[in-house]
Amino acid sequence: MSSHLPSVGHAHEEIHLPPPSWAPLIVGFGATLIGAGLLFPLALPVGLIVFLAGIWKMGHFTLLENPHPSLKVDHRLLGMWVFLASEIMFFAALLSTFLGYKARAGAAGALLNVPLMTIGTFVLLSSSFAAVSALSAIQANRMIAFRNWLITTMALGGLFLILELTEWLELIGHGITTGTLYGSAFFTLTGLHGMHVLIGIGWMVFLLIRTLRGTMSSGDAIGVEIFGLYWHFVDIVWIVLFTVIYLLR
Amino acid sequence: MTEYTPQLAQAEHKKPKYLLVFFALAVITLVEVTVAARMPAVLVVLSLAKVVLVALYYMHLKFSSGLFSAIFAIPLPFVLLIVVALVVALAPGPDNTAAAAGVCSFF
């Protein structure tokens, strides 16, 4: 719900703001605890719980309309695109480090299981198709189809993580651990990508719970569109990682 | 409740064939892991083609405001910079920090 504050100067102008909430502070506190978890491991699970509780609360905020009609693009989509631009730089730095260390690491890349992660690539590409189909469904107010596509996307994301975990265990079995040069670069890069997949799955769980409760409708399509942008971006990152790590060995 | 934005409405009118895009992505991946597996230049081109397909059709850049495409493109020169600089800096051999700094100053 948006509160309508009295305007200053213009009699008919309204300022739309979300209602006051502690949720952003809870999220910030949780994130701080997660950061502290790097030094004090016990703080990590507590931080995660606090962080997710805040996110859960923020997820119930009503998405506001464009505050300025003169803005030709949707401000929520704009925000996600700017975030994704920052994510491009984040992964570029990790990928560059991997490429640099790979040159020093010798033949460790020969131990990678290319067929397994080729299947993983197909799984993630399929999940992107499922995600965009979920968006089409909710735009058409076909809520059962939306729910089914959402569950499909989640399942495929989960399957990708299982395949990735299998690959990690195989590599560790071959002695490629985080203690090796190649391993540290590889696990950091694929691990942070996997974490993004996990966050996406968490986001879908939230959407699914809302759908099962009957509080989602075609009016919430914009929220699904924003989620879709995130999920497809994670797919794009994997397309690049798969080529660089697995094919250009 | 939120109504559709003009961008979404536009995207809906010109909804692409998502399944066709998926098959294109799948075929390119198959080519990558079979025919092109030992051709680095071809692999890079095919990978970029997949990125473009996902961005244009699944992320609706083809139907959205050019501003979104611009935001997506702005980091790319910096990506090139950071990749070249870090790969040079971390290359095997003597300390390459000076060479990496040279790459940065060239940009």
Image (spheres, rainbow, N blue to C red):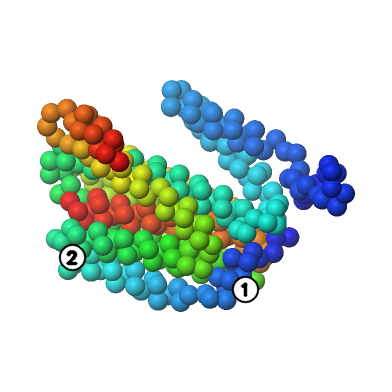
Look at label 2 and name its amino acid. Ala
Find disc 1 in the rendering and name its residue.
A140
Considering only vertical position in the picture, is A109 above or below B51? above
Q: Picture coordinates of residue A223 (x, y %)?
A: 61, 57
Q: Secondary structure at mark 2?
A: loop
Q: Secondary structure at mark 1?
A: loop
Q: Residue at x 19, y 59 (%)?
A: B41
Q: Residue at x 70, y 57 (%)?
A: A69
Q: Residues within 10 Å of mark 1 (few under 14, many from 20)?
A: some
Q: How many marks?
A: 2
Q: Does residue A127 appear in the picture of this structure?
A: no
Find disc 2 in the rendering and name its residue.
B36
Q: Marks 2 and 1: which is nearer the front?
A: 2
Disc 2 versus disc 1: distance between alpha carbons?
40 Å
Q: Picture coordinates of residue A78 (x, y %)?
A: 56, 53
Considering only vertical position in the picture, is A35 above or below B27? above
Residue A232 versus residue B71: which sits nearer the camera? B71
